[in-house]
Amino acid sequence: MPFKYYNVTLILIGINVAVFFISYYIAPTIYNYIGMNPALVVAWNWWWQVFTYMFAHAGIWHLLFNMLGLFFFGVQLERRIGSNEYLLFYLLTGTLAGLFSLLVYWATGAYHVWLVGASGAVFAVLLAYATYYPTSTILIFGIIPVKAPVLIVGYAAIEIFSMFSRNQGNVAHLTHLAGFGFAFLYLLIRLRINPVREFLDSRR
């Protein structure tokens, strides 16, 4: 796409914040329509939920952490690839992560799970950021310096371990990993950049 920059990251954050306050304080029933529930999607054909789920959040802290990640990594990525490409990347990877999660939930009989949050798309943004800025250093908790590729590998390991642990809580580890996976494919196929190669080259 032609390179244009109009700070779509802030627009996405604004939409997420607005949807959160509307669904929590003005019209709570909206949450049932925009969150993703496998039974509603398949039985009632509410297929829009595989897209809208990433604009719904379970609480203020859920929203805060996702929006902070989107702000810190999304702004830089958007400046690198352009706002139009970035918006397509964000929405497509988030939707595909939701669709993949739906298929797995349905296949495993988890019909009544509710999937909400921008985490799948945010994890995709994180992988893309690390691919384009493999030498950048991220301060975990503002203290511990970690290279972006190392953070990606660490997150992936934690998500895989957590997904198979007995106490998964209410975290959609599968969706996070799907975000990584679809981001990898998007970068490789559409943007012609190999994250693995970029990570390895940054160590030389």
Image: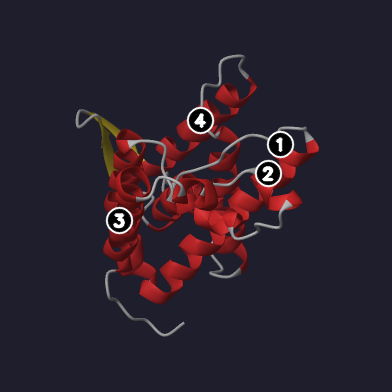
Query: Which residue matches tag 3?
Result: 18
Which mark is drawn over residue 38? 2
> In what element is the residue under mark 4?
loop
- Who comes first in sequence, dot 2 or dot 4? 2
Query: Which residue matches tag 4?
Result: 171
- Who comes first in sequence, dot 3 or dot 1? 3
> In what element is the residue under mark 2?
helix
Residue name at image x 36 percent, y 54 percent = 19
- Does residue 202 sit above or below 59 in this rendering? below
> In what element is the residue under mark 1?
loop
Query: Which residue matches tag 1?
Result: 111
Mark 4 and mark 1: Cα distance apart in space: 16 Å
Residue type at the position of mark 2: Pro
Mark 2 and mark 1: Cα distance apart in space: 5 Å
Q: Nearer the viewer, mark 3 or mark 4?
A: 3
> In what element is the residue under mark 3?
helix
Residue name at image x 24 percent, y 29 percent = 141
